[in-house]
Image (cartoon, helix red, strand yellow):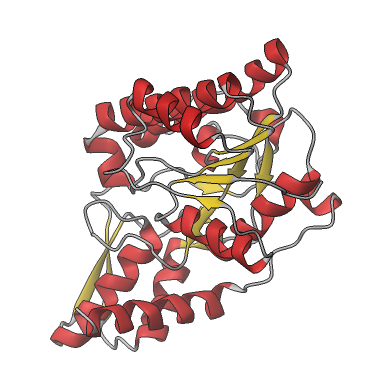
Amino acid sequence: MELKGKVYVAGHRGMVGSAIVRQLTRKGITEIIGKTSAELDLRNQALVEAFFEAYRPDYVFLAAAKVGGIYANNVYRAEFLYDNIMIATNVIHAAWKYKVKKLLFLGSSCIYPKFAPQPIREEFLLTGPLEPTNEPYAIAKIAGLKLCENYRRQYGCNFFAVMPTNLYGPNDNYELESAHVLPALIRKFHEARTKGLKQVVVWGDGSPLREFMHVDDLAKACVFLMENYEEAEIINVGTGQEISIKDLALLIKKIVGFEGEIVFDTEKPNGTPRKLLDCSRLQAMGFFPEIPLERGIREVYHEYVSNLSHK
């Protein structure tokens, strides 16, 4: 299936949305629609429906979301639940109402049970309790994927959901209170090096295992799936490789050039002990990521430093 017509990327300025826009542009797709949150509040149903009525997109990538790391998820629990449920509900309902040909909803690997068997297969969804620190966000994402599933079942909509692993890349969030672990560590190590500090504090004991995927690889997977995937079931998108938070910290320390010590704050939460996605369904379709972790981190660190110099 070739994407012909108008493509709406919800969240087009975020890390994921902007990567999807870059990938669509590379493929020569010119009718790309994007609205900032100031231009279109996706939590407002009337505004969302007015937008769909006016623009009539043929395809929708639903990448808009309120996102953050452990701290933000745990503190702003009501906002993470309300904002993300409203965004998913309004966009998916309007996509049905205005006859969008196909919609891809971006979920998250945090939808899976905290102690799911590893690697995590799609069918493990709703088989156990969630990680408490990000439960509101996970429930909102589960609601979104269930909306896709049930609008398909009731109305025959070609809507589906992908579950990406932990992401990093251009346009990431480096604010320490709300950042995910990888960009937060980049900022911590860079500031420690530039200020001549002796140590960097890392939350938890360093033992959790995580999988990280460059957002450009995710964008390629999303466009690939929009063109080739016709099933109702959710589908995982990841690398199949994992690294401990301790080893990630050591890798970033090396890339940044910080020469002090790493201190692990064991009073802070670890989060899920291990989270590795089984991506065999995606791989069976012939898609594999291309950007290795160390190269990807070096590229985003260069971007981070370059952006600082232009402020």
Any part of residue 130 in sight: no
Up-down relation of residue 70 to residue 103 (above or below) = below
Q: Residue at x 33, y 28 (%)?
A: 43
Instruction: Give the x, y percent position of residue 120.
Output: 66, 41
Up-down relation of residue 171 to residue 209 (above or below) = below
User: Which image quadrant: the C terminus?
Assistant: bottom left
Q: Between 157 and 298, which is closer to the camera in this rendering?
A: 157
Q: Is residue 110 left or right of residue 41?
A: right
Up-down relation of residue 216 to residue 285 (above or below) = below
Instruction: Give the x, y percent position of residue 292.
Output: 62, 74
Q: Is residue 273 left or right of residue 249?
A: right
Q: Is residue 40 left or right of residue 100?
A: left
Q: Between 35 and 205, which is closer to the camera in this rendering?
A: 35
Instruction: Give the x, y percent position of residue 254.
Output: 41, 85
Instruction: Give the x, y percent position of residue 216.
Output: 57, 65
Q: Between 177 and 119, which is closer to the camera in this rendering?
A: 177
